[in-house]
Image (tube, grey):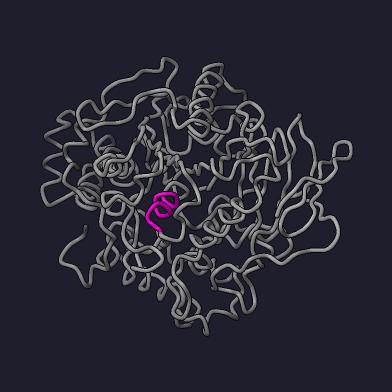
Amino acid sequence: MTDVASEAGSHPHVRVAGGALRGTREEGVAVFRGIPFAEPPVGPLRFAAPRRARRWDGVRPAVSYGPPPPQGGHFGMDVLARDAAGDDWLTVNVWSPEPGPGAGLPVMVWIQGGAYSIGMSGLPEYDGGRLARDGGVVVVTFNYRVGPEGFGQIEGTPANRGLLDQVAALEWVRDNIRAFGGDPGRVTVFGQSAGAGSIAALLAMPRAAGLFGRAVAQSVPATFFSPELAADIAAACAAELGLRPTATALSGVDPARLSAAADRVASAMDRWADRWGPAAHRAIPFSPVVDGEILPTTPWQALADGAGRDVDLLVGHTRDETRLLTALDGLLGQITPEQAARALHAYGPGRDAAHRYREAFPTASPDELYELVGSDWLFRMPSLHLAQAQTAAGGRAHVYELTWSAPGMGGALGACHGLDVPLVFGNLEHGQPAALIGEKPFPEAEEVSARMRRAWTEFAAHGDPGWPAYGSAQRLVRLFDTRPALTAYPEEASRLIWQDHTFPALPLLAEADQAV
């Protein structure tokens, strides 16, 4: 049972299953932060499936974000996690323009990315105030376990604990969101990168069935691991500490030490390339595991079999996905022909992938080939194939591509990975992704952001983002740019190269004939 209690001044109050909450009001939006949806996953609950949060007495202040889970060291996220006291990692945050059980507003639940190794809901770029206020929706964000805590294949523990955290958060939304003005029957999940991969996984998970009716997947990554590959990587992480990858051995290790060990493995994954394949080339130590139980099969196979037929899907990618990653590697504009050849071999579909790319893009430079095959393998084709699997099974999917170029670095990053995040939230002056847009947002950024926010909130409200669904005949796609367009899928050459690829779970190559 949930209901609304009295509201005093600028401090809205609600009552949820766990007890009473006091939030804040910010620019006309009621905000509640740091609400526990599960018990802290520490001590006896470490590496366990999430357990429902206990009730509390009195009125709980919900005015600050809960502490983030242990993090990898990218972008200083490990420091942010260590600086936040407490182990109540599993919390949700809610922004509502109209709290109260009778409002019946659409609900948008954000799942952040971070390569399944980093990520926290308290980053300023994920503030849901503008999206909630302008779009008339209830916005929810939450923390889930990442890195070895959430995705390490540890003996004696359930697989995909980070995904189970997400299911628990969605169950909390189902049971409590009415108190905040949301309609539990109109829940849309939306996420980017690893968040989009998580949404793809949720579409394939029986435990998540019925928890959302619409899904927005922004830049779906290709990486889903076989149990053997995930276990081998976990063994390497544990070996950094002189331990075996078991719950008994690792439960007493400080989470920060375990995350640091995983970082050391990730920084030297190239030496494992013959064993771990593309995951090693791209330094991706964690991903959802197709374990046959929690995640029975890959999302592409599940959707082709009809698992998402009753879920409206909006899916897409940016045009220049991996250019930012190349810049972060210090390789922008410096790719050699040998590096391009290795990328074509590592990521391309089939033994003749290099020939097919060079034939399809005869004037492409090494830099362009490196970016094309990397973007296609990691984000662009997995996103497109998710839409194709959905429509082939009789479901509905709308497809988009972000083609507006980021002004940052003189426009060198193009329409890169992560640019969509500040545009969708409308937080153009906050956080690391917003740095892509420059110190002051360009008017064009506001225009593109307004279009994307309108499309996302209209999709959440009505299932229609404003353009026709994708179909095998016309393949219509919305391009987001200063001059938006509706056109046939623009990456046709790549689509043809990848049209027969199935995106299976990545294997341990010691037990496979070749990379997939």
Which residue appears farthest toward the bottom when viewing the image?
248
Instruction: Please identify the quarter of the rendering in which residue 385 is found.
Output: top left
Q: Quadrant of the N terminus?
A: bottom right
Assign the magenta stretch its main secondary structure. Answer: helix
Q: Is residue 7 magenta?
A: no
Q: Position of residue 287 (x, y in %)?
A: 41, 59
Instruction: Please identify the quarter of the rendering in which residue 134 is found.
Output: top right
Residue lying at 63% horizontally and 66% vertically, measured from the top left: 52
Residue lying at 47% horizontally and 48% vertically, measured from the top left: 195
Q: Quadrant of the C terminus?
A: bottom left
Judge left or right: residue 412 versus residue 373.
right
Residue 31 in view here: yes
Residue lying at 17% horizontally and 31% vertically, measured from the top left: 361
Residue 370 in view here: no
- In this view, the residue in front, 257 or 60, is 60
Q: Is residue 201 magenta?
A: yes
Q: Which residues are magenta?
A: 197-205
- In this view, the residue in front, 3 or 491, is 3
Q: Position of residue 213 (x, y in %)?
A: 46, 43
- In this view, the residue in front, 49 or 273, is 49
- In this view, the residue in front, 223 or 30, is 30
Relative height, residue 249 to residue 100 (above, below): below
Q: Position of residue 418 (x, y in %)?
A: 47, 38
How many marks do you count on the picture?
Answer: 0
